[in-house]
Each structure stands twice: as structure tokens, then as C-alpha cells.
């Protein structure tokens, strides 16, 4: 079984620029999550999708972050404009049903300079 | 969500058992206890989860206290590949995805 794919693996941008991350979950997994992990901390949930609908985006900074999951498969997370404090690893995870034994991708490491 | 408390770091010798503790005194009756671990430069990976009874799988064992206010992840024979950050999280039903990750326990395995 192929894992959760994320790209790019690394990204360096200047503050105020925009950036997008892509996630392809495990085939058939209806639930998809995006997390932000700042160095030295545990992952923090940003948004949860069930198929192509948003279940929870209460911790997503909506003034600059947006996410979509068209057709209930791939997902993109965008930051516009980026701030220095957005430097982190952005992790995508998926599961066949909400939360049970979910699988993470390797993440995208974002550095904002 | 109920919070968990874990030691910041632990050390173990290779081939010896490791007991990683987690306190969750405010756990509710419907909260599952999940353990994930994160190896360097990788996303977290599922280790084990349980509700009330002790659980075993090929990776580890989970011992849950009778009052469910604490649990222990047991690695029966630590290897160098087990060096990672271990997270104990709580979730309602099985929806671990919405749980709050703390900062976990960094396990160092010495050869």
C-alpha cells in the first residue's frame, strides 16, 4: 500500500510571498488532515476534511491560510502571505475513517526568511 | 480535549525493555488512548491504541491503569531504530486526528 505523498519536500520563501503544499492521501481514505509542526513541538491540527467537505478548521488562521480538497482525493494547503512564524513542517495525514489508525506523510519543511 | 503529561526525555539501553509513561488524569470515559512515534525527518507513525484493556501488537504493548488515569507504552526490546519522539494522545471514540499532541517523550537508545 502506497503511503501518503506530499510535495514539495522542502521550500524556502521570503516573507509576504505565497506558497502551496500538495497532499495525495492513501487511496480510498476519506478523512484527510493537515497539521503544522513547529520545531521541538508536537503537531498541531490545522484542518480536517471528510471526503471533500471541511469537518473542522477552527485552528486554521483563515486570514492567510486556505485549504481545499477537490473531488475528495488530493488536497492543497496555501499560505498567502507568509510570515516568519509560519516556518514549520506541514504534515498531511489520512485515514479510512475519522482518526482510526491514521497515516502521516513525511511532510513539507517550510522556511520563511 | 483532555491533556496528557509525558516526561520530556528517557534513555534506554539496546535490547532492554522500555516503559514510557503517560498521565491523563482528566480522561473521559469515551476517550481512547493512542500512541504515535516520530522518527527524525518523518511524520508520526501509529504505534498502538486502547480504551480499557491492555493491548498488544507487533510493535509494542499498552498497559492501561485500572482507573485509566495513566498508561504505559512498553517496548519489549529496544533497538536503535526505536529512538524517536513518542506521543501519547487522547481522543473521543477513535477520532485521534482531532486530538492535541503534546511535546512527547524523546527516547534515546544507547548501544
Image: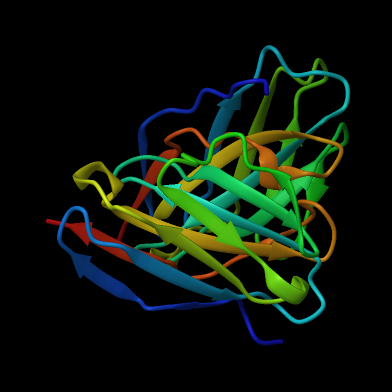
Q: Is residue A4 above or below residue A50?
A: below
- State the image quarter where residue B24 is shown: top right
Q: How is the image coloured?
A: rainbow
Q: Is residue B62 above or below residue A106?
A: above
Q: Which one is in front, A88 or B25?
A: A88
Residue at 25% x, 42% y is A85
Given the current orientation, which residue lies at the most extreme left position? A113
Report x, y in % for residue A36.
44, 49
How many dots with numbers? 0
Q: Which one is in front, B39 or B99?
A: B99
Q: Quadrant of the C terminus of chain A?
A: bottom left
Q: Is residue A100 left or right of residue B88?
A: right
Asked if one can make out residue B83 in the rendered structure from this viewpoint, the answer is: no
Given the current orientation, which residue lies at the most extreme bottom position? A1
Report x, y in % for residue A15.
17, 54
Residue at 71% x, 17% y is B69
- State the image quarter where residue A69 is shown: bottom right
Q: Is residue B102 above or below residue B56?
A: above
Q: Quadrant of the N terminus of chain A?
A: bottom right
Report x, y in % for residue B57.
76, 59
Report x, y in % for residue A111.
21, 59
Asked if one can make out residue A73 in the rendered structure from this viewpoint, the answer is: yes
Residue at 76% x, 51% y is A99
Q: Is residue B32 left or right of residue B16?
A: right
Q: Is residue A33 above or below residue A106?
A: above
Q: Which one is in front, B82 or A2?
A: A2
Q: Which one is in front, A55 or A17?
A: A17
Amino acid at each position: 500500500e502506497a503511503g501518503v505523498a506530499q510535495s514539495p519536500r522542502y521550500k524556502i520563501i521570503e516573507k509576504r510571498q505565497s506558497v502551496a503544499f500538495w497532499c495525495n492521501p492513501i487511496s480510498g481514505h476519506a478523512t484527510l488532515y493537515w497539521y503544522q509542526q513547529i520545531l521541538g513541538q508536537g503537531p498541531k491540527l490545522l484542518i480536517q476534511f471528510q471526503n471533500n467537505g471541511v469537518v473542522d478548521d477552527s485552528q486554521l488562521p483563515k486570514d492567510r491560510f486556505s485549504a481545499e480538497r477537490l473531488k475528495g482525493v488530493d488536497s492543497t494547503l496555501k499560505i498567502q502571505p507568509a510570515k516568519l512564524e509560519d516556518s514549520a513542517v506541514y504534515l498531511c495525514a489520512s485515514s479510512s475513517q475519522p482518526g482510526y489508525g491514521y497515516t502521516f506523510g513525511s511532510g513539507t519543511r517550510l522556511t520563511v526568511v | 480535549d483532555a491533556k496528557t503529561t509525558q516526561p520530556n526525555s528517557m534513555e534506554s539501553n539496546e535490547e532492554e525493555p522500555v516503559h514510557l509513561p503517560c498521565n491523563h488524569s482528566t480522561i473521559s470515559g469515551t476517550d481512547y488512548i493512542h500512541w504515535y512515534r516520530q522518527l527524525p525527518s518523518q511524520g508520526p507513525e501509529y504505534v498502538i491504541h486502547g480504551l480499557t484493556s491492555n493491548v498488544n501488537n507487533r510493535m509494542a504493548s499498552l498497559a492501561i491503569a485500572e482507573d485509566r488515569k495513566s498508561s504505559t507504552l512498553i517496548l519489549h526490546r529496544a533497538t536503535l531504530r526505536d529512538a524517536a519522539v513518542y506521543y501519547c494522545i487522547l481522543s473521543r471514540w477513535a477520532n485521534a486526528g482531532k486530538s492535541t499532541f503534546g511535546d512527547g517523550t524523546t527516547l534515546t537508545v544507547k548501544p
